[in-house]
Every structure is written in structure tokens, then in C-alpha cells.
Image: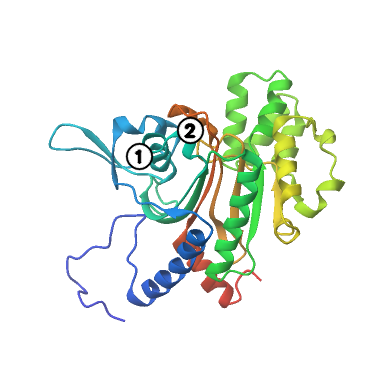
Amino acid sequence: MTPILNGSNARPGPSGTRDVLPDEMRELRDMTRVMVDLLDDAGYGEVRTPTLEYERAMDGSELGPRAAYRLIDEHGDALVLRSDMTVPIVRVAVTRYEPNALPLRFSYLARAWRRVKPRSGEAREILQLGAELIGSEPADAAVELLELCGEALSSAGLADWQIGLGDGRILGELLASSGVSADDAEVLLEAVRDQDLVTVDSLAQRIAIPQAATIARTRINGVDLEEFDPVGLGINPASPAWSDLTAVVRALSPEFRARVVLDLGLAPKIDYYDGLVFEAYDPAIGRALGGGGSYDALLRAFGSSASGFGFALDTELVHAAVAGEERGEGS
């Protein structure tokens, strides 16, 4: 089809953004409506927070994704365009609710704006659907949100989704107990986060801890957990990270557990995740559809001692995965 304005000075939108045309928009609207209703029926009240936040009110956001856009209003106050929804929802929880109101369950369908690496193909503008549970017992919250995320993916029309579940503390505990310097540990953990396995292998060899490289590659089907021996990888079975991870897996329903892969090299890509972390996948799409985890550190940054767990899905990636499954891709 020849564009109406072919040869004109019209330009596409900024990199990392795209236009959504009517047919796709109808499909997206129908899909997200089903997902929003699912979260509402599960007791997660939908909230809306301002697109712009005062920069000073986002003190805890230094743990979250860095704001892509900053501007000054007519009063000289610095504002930021939100880069995710978890930080604003934590702000709402600690400023609008009393401690005796816990636990709090929130859901949202909202846009966020992220920094992107040049030519990375990453989206700058994301329509996120997610849920947050604040003030519940951590293991119970993890099980509830993991299974709710799976239900949301199924309600969208996905049949082949899987969950990668890990805990960034596992590798950190090994490095700490082995006396690795803070600088080397930081570089290695950053390489694991970026899935730069060449750097992981090189550094693990230099610091003489080959188990670090093995852990970064270890994947275990959830149903095979009982047959796995963590000691051989230098993992203390009684450590908080391993205990929390395995307790959650064992508490999942058998149907959900069959879709879980324990990814011991899965590291949080957002700094406020400080324990269990997970990503959602579908073979029709070659990247994570979304994910989440526990963020007690973020709540502490806002002066709360409560625990938090949540997830967010990129609705346009979920929609693309549904279309891919229908075409038989990835099967």
C-alpha cells in the first residue's frame, strides 16, 4: 500500500515507539479488557496514578528504572515521566493507606516510558498490565501473584507460556561466602544480569569459582526439583534464597509447577527486586513478555517495613505472542 503522504516531509514517531492501527487496536482492547476483569475478579482493585510525578516524591525510584524524561513545571519543580508503575503504587500505599489496611491488592493498565539502548529494538513506550500485593506473607504473596500472572496469560489466549523463576541472592550468597571482592562480585552479577556469559566464564575462571558460571547456566524443571542437589553447585540448601525459592515452588499448584523452570542465573533487571524474581515467556516470541518479583527494599526506601510482590506484562508483546501462536510460530 502506498502511504497517502508518500514523498512528503512526514516522519514516523520517535525510535522505540510505534503506531497502533484500528484492527490491532480492537484486538488489544478486547484482550486487555479480559485481563483487567480477571485481576478485578481476583480482588485487585484497579488504580491510576499521574503520568507525571514530582521527582522529589520518587526518592525510592533510584532503585527502579531511571526516568527517560525530565521536565520543569511553571513553578520550577522537577517532574519525571513515570518509568514503571510499581514505584508510584508503593508511593500510593505508604501515603494514602494506614498500616492496618494491609494487605493491599492493586492492579493497573497504564503506560510507562523507559530509556532504551540505541538500535536495541526495545520499546520506549510500554502499555503495562500488572498487579501488586503489599503487606502479605512473602511466600504466600509469591504463590498468589505467580499463579495470577499465569491466569492472565491464559486469559489473553496464550497456551504455551512458561515461567522462569529464580533468586538473584543465590549467586550473591556464593560469592560472599567465597570471599570474592565487592568489585569482582559486582562485575560478575552485572554480566549475569546482561546474560553476558563470555564475561561470566572469564571472571569465574579468574576468581577460581567455576560454580558461578555453572549456576548462571543452570535450568531445572519445577517438577524435577526434588531430584536436584544444590550442594554440588556450592549452594547452601539452608540459605534464605534457596529455602525461599524451593518453598514457593513446592507450594505452587501441580498444573502451574509443570510450567515453571528454575533459572538459577536469572538476575533482577530492576534494582528494587531483592529476592524472588521471575519472567514470563512464550515460544512464539523471543523475549520475555514481562515479569516481576519481591521488592521489600523499595518499600523500605519509602519508610515501610511491609513486604511487596508484583508483576507487569507488556500487553503488546503478549498480543504479538497470541498472534504468533495462532500462526504456529515457536511450536
- Residue 307: x and y in percent read 55, 35
Amino acid type at image mark 1: Ala
For the point 63% across and 56% down, which residue is it? 147
Residue underneath mark 2? 298
- Whether residue 122 is visible, yes or no, is no
Q: Give the residue number, with chain letter if any, for mark 1.
A: 67
User: Which one is nearer the viewer's eye here, 295 or 79?
Assistant: 295
Identify residue type, mark 2.
Answer: Leu
Please report whichever mark, 1 or 2, sits nearer to the chain's N-terminal start. 1
Q: Can you tell which quarter of the image residue 330 is in?
A: bottom right
Q: Residue at x 65, y 49 (%)?
A: 143
For the C terminus, the quadrant is: bottom right
Position in image of residue 148 (x %, y %): 58, 57
Q: Secondary structure at mark 1?
A: loop
Q: Is residue 46 visible?
A: yes
From this view, report whether residue 226 is shown above or below residue 295.
below
Q: CA distance from mark 1 to mark 2?
A: 16 Å
Q: Vertical placement of 71 versus 252: above or below?
A: above
Q: Residues within 10 Å of mark 1 (few under 14, many from 20)?
A: some
Q: Is residue 45 above or below residue 97?
A: below
Query: Residue 66 versus residue 237: which sits nearer the camera?
Result: 237
Q: Is residue 57 left or right of residue 194?
A: left
Query: Is 102 displayed left or right of 177 in the figure?
Result: left
User: What is the count of numbered marks?
Assistant: 2
Q: Position of residue 260 (x, y in %)?
A: 70, 54
From the viewer's side, name the closer residue of 20 and 144.
144
